[in-house]
Image: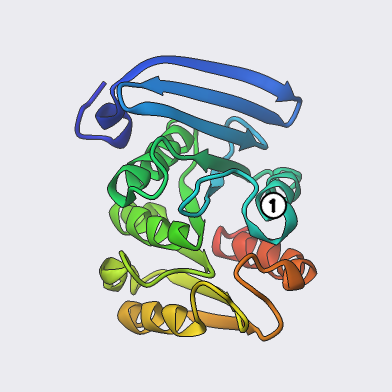
Amino acid sequence: MDGSTPLGQLGVLAVQDVNITPRMRHLELFTRTGLLTVLWHGPRDADAALIACGGAMGGLLGPANGLFQFLGDELGARGIATLRVSYRRPNDLDACVIDAGAASEMAIAEGARSLVVMGHSFGGAVAINAAAHLGALAPGVVTLSTQSAGCEIAGMIADRELLLVHGGRDELLPVWASEVVKEIAGTGELVVYPPAGHLLLECADELRELLPGWITGVLGRD
């Protein structure tokens, strides 16, 4: 395996790839530096995919009452894969960016030619960094309650579609964190839900309305 790629950098020792349901695979990559877990919704050979990254504590559900699970089911029904990433070392930005890159590499190896990268909180920095390295393969980025730390590279995605979502009552990261990222990127649309906190529970329904259409639009699937 090429050590210059994210998968190559992981030093994968073994892989388990099990179909949990007809529409979801559970992959475990045993590496020298920890276990990387990926839940893969939708077609194995999809030509477009969403890479979904959690926060500093890791996790697979995402915010807003299991938003990542919902998107996996919803987009899978439209022929778009969703890869939900559980990090080897949560809160280690460099390692988590490699994990997101490895998931992207897996999707590309099986046919994906266009990706949207999404991240919640700390995962917003992961998404921005991963998309910057992916280049034209990642025409879209979504951040949810993002931090600004680690997003200094956001200018590298100035030519992409960028959607930033934040809660007006975020108790951990104020709205200005998304505003700073948008300013660094020099592009993007910031959507603020005034009643919502960091987990965006109060706007879960609105996100389920907003995100599938935005993602499919960026991926050319309107």
Where, by quadrant of the figure, is residue 184 drawn? bottom left
- x%, y% of residue 115? 48, 51
Question: Residue, x 20% and y 34% (percent of image)?
Answer: 4
Total number of numbered labels?
1
- x%, y% of residue 198? 60, 69
**Compared with residue 56, is residue 28 higher up or lower down, i.e. above or below?**
above
Front residue of this view, candidates 174 and 23? 174
Question: Residue, x 65% and y 50% (percent of image)?
Answer: 68
- x%, y% of residue 140? 47, 63
**Compared with residue 148, is residue 2 higher up or lower down, i.e. above or below?**
above
Query: Which residue is disc 1 drawn over?
Result: 71
> What residue occupies the far right of the structure in this picture?
205
- x%, y% of residue 34? 38, 27
Is residue 156 visible to us here?
no
Front residue of this view, candidates 196 and 1? 196
Q: Residues within 10 Å of mark 1 (few under 14, many from 20)?
A: many
Give the colour scheme shown.
rainbow
Is residue 221 visible to us here?
yes
> What residue occupies the far front of the structure in this picture?
171
Q: Residue type at mark 1?
A: Leu
Helix, strand, or loop for circle 1? helix
Question: Residue, x 53% and y 70% (percent of image)?
Answer: 145
Q: Image quadrant for the C terminus?
A: bottom right
